[in-house]
Amino acid sequence: MSGAASYLARRAAQKERVRILYRRALKDTLTWAVHRHLFYPDADALRERFDANKNVASQQALLAATQETLAKVVEALVTLNNNKDVASANFSALVPAAAETHISHAHFLSEDIDTIDRMIADGEGQYNKWRHPDPYIVPWAPGGSKFTRNPTPPSGIEIVYDYGREDQS
């Protein structure tokens, strides 16, 4: 598997783990605060915690990308200085082009895979630590109070529905 393919596969697995963790934490939040007027502020706080860690970046990778972009800008300045006939208005066109070529590269480098894995593991650990001891289960779901309340009778047992009139025949 090539480097880019393995990177994309690992990022996809991480995104799935985060999605599952968020859904479980949201459902568990509803278990702690059953009433909706209590649940909504807690759900908003949970979403803010997830959004705060949405763009995890390695400081070294961001610094390297910034230095590369700065080098391109300096190169564009030197090119403009050497070409005296070029108007200064063309400089504004060169800077975004130099920066644009490195933005996607910087984004690719800035995602530190190991840091993201550690953060997901920490989040799963916190979720397991603060899970509700008696979670709310929908009554008709497996584990709920109504699940198989009226099971089908075992084979060999006959149910007679004519309530005593069977002797009249």
Image: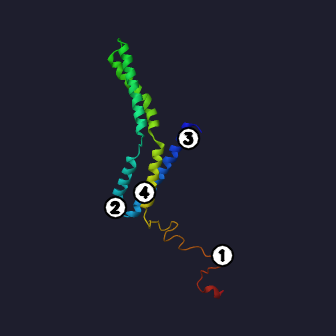
Q: Where is residue 4 in the image (x, y as percent from the top left)?
A: 54, 37
Q: What residue is drawn where x is 35% and y is 15%?
A: 81
Alpha carbon separation for disc pair 2 and 3: 42 Å
Residue type marked 1: Ser
Position of 129 with respect to 89 (left or right) is: right
Vertical placement of 133 versus 155: above or below?
A: above
Labels 1 and 3: the sequence-earlier one: 3
Q: Where is residue 48 in the image (x, y as percent from the top left)?
A: 36, 50
Q: Position of residue 126 (x, y in %)?
A: 42, 57
Do the numbered discs 1 and 2 sit on residues whose CB atoms are within 8 Å?
no
- Residue 155 - label: 1
Element under disc 3 = helix
Element under disc 2 = helix
Do the numbered discs 4 and 3 sit on residues whose CB atoms are within 8 Å?
no
Image quarter for residue 62?
Answer: top left
Image quarter for residue 77?
Answer: top left
Q: What residue is drawn where x is 58% and y is 37%?
A: 2
Residue, disc 2: 38
Labels 2 and 4: the sequence-earlier one: 2
Labels 2 and 3: the sequence-earlier one: 3
Residue, disc 4: 126
Q: Can residue 81 be seen in this view?
A: yes
Residue type marked 2: Leu
Q: Say few, some or many: other residues with alpha carbon within 10 Å of mark 3 (under 14 / 14 to 19 / 20 or more).
A: few
Which image quarter holds the N terminus?
Answer: top right
Do the numbered discs 2 and 3 sit on residues whose CB atoms are within 8 Å?
no
Alpha carbon separation for disc pair 1 and 4: 48 Å
